[in-house]
Image: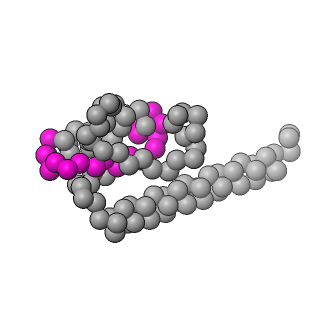
Amino acid sequence: MFRENMNIYDLVITSVNMPDMDAFKLLEFVGLEMGLLVIMLSVYGDTKLVKKGITHGTCDYLFKPVRIAELKNIWQHVVRKNKFDFRDHINALNQDNRHVNEDPSI
């Protein structure tokens, strides 16, 4: 599901405790292989789980119950990052076009 539609996702929020899936394998796949931001949620304040999440690539680790203000703050950072990434991409394309236009052999 993620591979086919990875361009439509900005962020994945997942629970550490899932009955049918290892959250850390999901984190590695979605975060490291696909480059998506992942936030992990847990009801447990276990520092070992937090460290494991960080070493496996989570961008944040929140404890349940999660406050809406926390999610809004994180979402604002994601939107801002995507905006800057898009701006950088456009600038790179403009530079490439400038080089092409200046090259007399093209």
Q: Position of residue 93 (x, y in %)?
A: 69, 51
Residue 103 visible to the viewer: yes
In front of the other: 81 or 89 = 81
Start-end of magenta stretch: 31-48
Q: Position of residue 8 (x, y in %)?
A: 57, 47
In front of the other: 2 or 96 = 2
Residue 33's place in the image compared with 38, above or below, is above
Q: Position of residue 13 (x, y in %)?
A: 38, 49
Residue placed at 28% from the left, 34% from the top?
A: 19
User: Residue 33 lies in magenta, yes or no?
Assistant: yes
Residue placed at 52% from the left, 56% from the top?
A: 82
Q: How is the image coloured?
A: one colour
Residue 21's place in the image compared with 12, above or below, is above
Residue 27's place in the image compared with 41, above or below, is above
Kindly give the residue lying farthest to the front in the view shown. Answer: 19
Q: Quadrant of residue 72?
A: bottom left
The total of numbered circles placed on residues is 0
Residue 56 visible to the viewer: no
- In the picture, measured across the screen, residue 60 lies left or right of residue 106, that is left
In front of the other: 71 or 43 = 43
Q: Quadrant of residue 5?
A: top right
- In the picture, measured across the screen, residue 52 lies left or right of residue 32, that is left
Report the quarter where the C terminus lies: top right
Q: Position of residue 85 (x, y in %)?
A: 54, 54
Residue placed at 65% from the left, 56% from the top?
A: 91
Kindly give the residue lying farthest to the bottom in the view shown. Answer: 69
Residue placed at 76% from the left, 50% from the top?
A: 97
